Image (cartoon, helix red, strand yellow):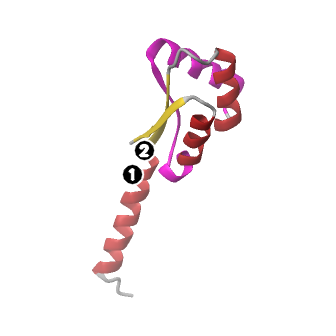
Amino acid sequence: MVISNHSEETLTQTVVKEAIDEVSTLVLYNDDVHTFDYVIETLVRVCEHTYEQAEQCAIIVHYKGKCDVKSGSYDYLSPLCEALLEAGLTAMIEG
């Protein structure tokens, strides 16, 4: 069986794209508007965090100004980011 360079190149591009997509991160930023409870409840609902995970993220956001709350492909993170924004939080996909 002979595999052409074109197939190998396509496969390589696909693998590289998937690797790049995997390094995207959903970042939540601090604000002075929302309560800890609201942020925690929103992270549990939107990102499917446990209460403890969401609480830790809220604390990190409060003291550090931002926190990586989820990682994955851009396509996976995009609706999560949109839901956080619709909830009034400040979030962005990085990477």
**Contact check, label 1 and label 2, Cβ < 8 Å:** yes
| Residue nearest the observer in this picture, 19 or 2 | 19
In the picture of the structure, the residue carrying the numbered disc 1 is: 20
Q: Hey, what amino acid is under mark 1?
A: Ile
Using the image, determine if residue 49 lies above or below residue 2: above
| Residue nearest the observer in this picture, 36 or 52 | 36
In the picture of the structure, the residue carrying the numbered disc 2 is: 23
Binning the other alpha carbons within 10 Å of mark 2 as few (below 14), some (14 to 19) or many (20 upward) gives few
Tag 2 secondary structure = loop
Which corner quadrant holds the N terminus?
bottom left
Residue 55 lies in the magenta-colored region: yes
Q: Position of residue 88 (x, y in %)?
A: 59, 30
Q: What segment is highlighted magenta in the picture?
A: 49-77
Q: Residue at x 62, y 40 (%)?
A: 83
**Left or right position of 23 against 6:** right
Which corner quadrant holds the C terminus?
top left
Using the image, determine if residue 49 lies above or below residue 64: below
Write down the quadrant of residue 41 in the picture: top right
**Left or right position of 93 against 48:** left
Write down the quadrant of residue 89 in the picture: top right
Estimate the spatial distance between the alpha carbons at disc 1 and disc 2, rounded to whole Å.
Answer: 6 Å
Q: Residue at x 40, y 65 (%)?
A: 14
Q: Residue at x 39, y 58 (%)?
A: 17
Looking at the image, the residue that sits furthest to the top is 63
Tag 1 secondary structure = helix
Using the image, determine if residue 43 lies above or below residue 23: above
Q: Position of residue 39 (x, y in %)?
A: 63, 23
Q: Residue at x 59, y 35 (%)?
A: 84
Q: Hey, what amino acid is under mark 2?
A: Val
